[in-house]
Amino acid sequence: MKAALMRAQREALVVEEVDLAEPGAGEVAVRLVATGVCHTDKAAWRGNRELKVPMVLGHEGAGIVEAVGPAVTSVAPGDHVVLAAIARCGRCEACVRGEPWLCGPAGTTIFDGTMLDGTTRLSQGGRPVYHFFSQSSFAERAVVPEGAAVRVRSDVPLERVATLACGVATGLGAVFNAAKVPIGASVAVIGCGGVGASVIAGADIAHAGMIVGIDVAEDKLAYARTLGATHTVNAAEEDAVERVRALSGGGIEIGFECVGGARTMAQLVAMLRPAGNGFIVGAAPPGTTFPFPTDGFIRNKHLHGVLLGNVRPSIDIPRYVELYAKGRLPLDRLVTRTYGLEGINDALAAMETSAGRGVVVFA
Ligand SMILES: [Zn+2]
Ligand SMILES: [Zn+2]
């Protein structure tokens, strides 16, 4: 099969033939129909941490089950599936207590390059090719753990719902699972890229009141307004904290940081009203720190970490698909660009400068 191979970090991906082994016990083989292209792919390619190479990136796949390994019970060949970025094991403490986004074994496979059993299914010329998120969806086919394969209704386009594997689900989950945004609440969203746009769309579905979108790119702010932002702030032109405080009459109730930067995290805390809740959704480079002024504690401000939207894939992804099917979730507008696999480098290059999310669609 064809896959976009990362031979070295920061070098252009190359589309080549690679081999994919049969699914092992508890694994599922999927023919990819589409895959989203996520900032975590870009950060990995850029080298924010060292990864084993050659590797196939990609962790927002959607496709059709071709075969299942021994002991697989939840999906069967022919099922349409979204491949959740975190492949819950179902047995660790986090999974048992209902927080599968913190699954220990799945967490280690994100960057380790292997499947849950520590081996690879990908190879080229008999040499191992490493996995990403135990998924590697920048390829025509993938073998994934059963816990990643979430069956969805077959009458929705997989190239639309692929982004529910990670990016869009991260934004929606931050709103519905982490923040539980109440009706009428005032909300600020720092960063209106793919995830931030999804937070705005989710806050609109949740009937938030004021929704303030903050970015430094005017086209992303215009895009945010089409998704439900009631106000926008260009942080390149004015002080975002002062502006949000003024708009909200002293501070925002709920804020989301979707950039993954120390400066924007400090801004998040500063723009909260007393007893407000801030959610850090963006993934900062490893080791990033930011100052948290102690008067935030005395004013009862709360700061929460969010991982992949705190999404329970097998429950939440089908719910988001239903929202899309009912016309409530604007996935058609959240996906703004499509590419073939040969266009994967263009898809990665377009991420910073383009609003919305890019998706690779397989022929
Ligand atoms: Zn992602
Ligand atoms: Zn687990």
Image (tube, grey):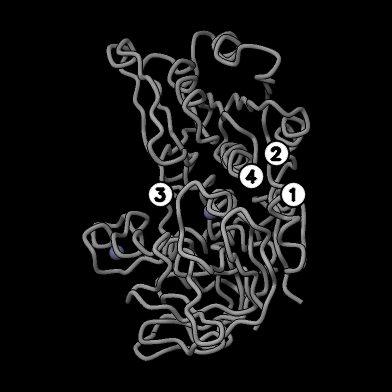
Contact check, label 1 and label 2, Cβ < 8 Å: yes
Give the residue type that dot 3 points to: Asn
Quickly name the residue at label 1: 333
Cα distance between the residues tagged 3 and 2? 22 Å
Quadrant holding the C terminus: bottom right
Cα distance between the residues tagged 1 and 4? 11 Å
Whichever of callouts 2 and 4 sits on the residue coming sooner in the sequence is: 4
Could you classify mark 4 by the number of other residues whose Cα lies within 10 Å: few (under 14), some (14-19), or many (20 or more)? many
Mark seen at residue 227: 2
Give the residue type that dot 1 points to: Arg
What residue appears at the point 69 percent right and 20 percent down from the top-left corner?
234
Quickly name the residue at label 3: 310
Secondary structure found at label 2: loop
Q: Position of residue 123 (x, y in %)?
A: 52, 81
Quickly name the residue at label 4: 194
Could you classify mark 3 by the number of other residues whose Cα lies within 10 Å: few (under 14), some (14-19), or many (20 or more)? many
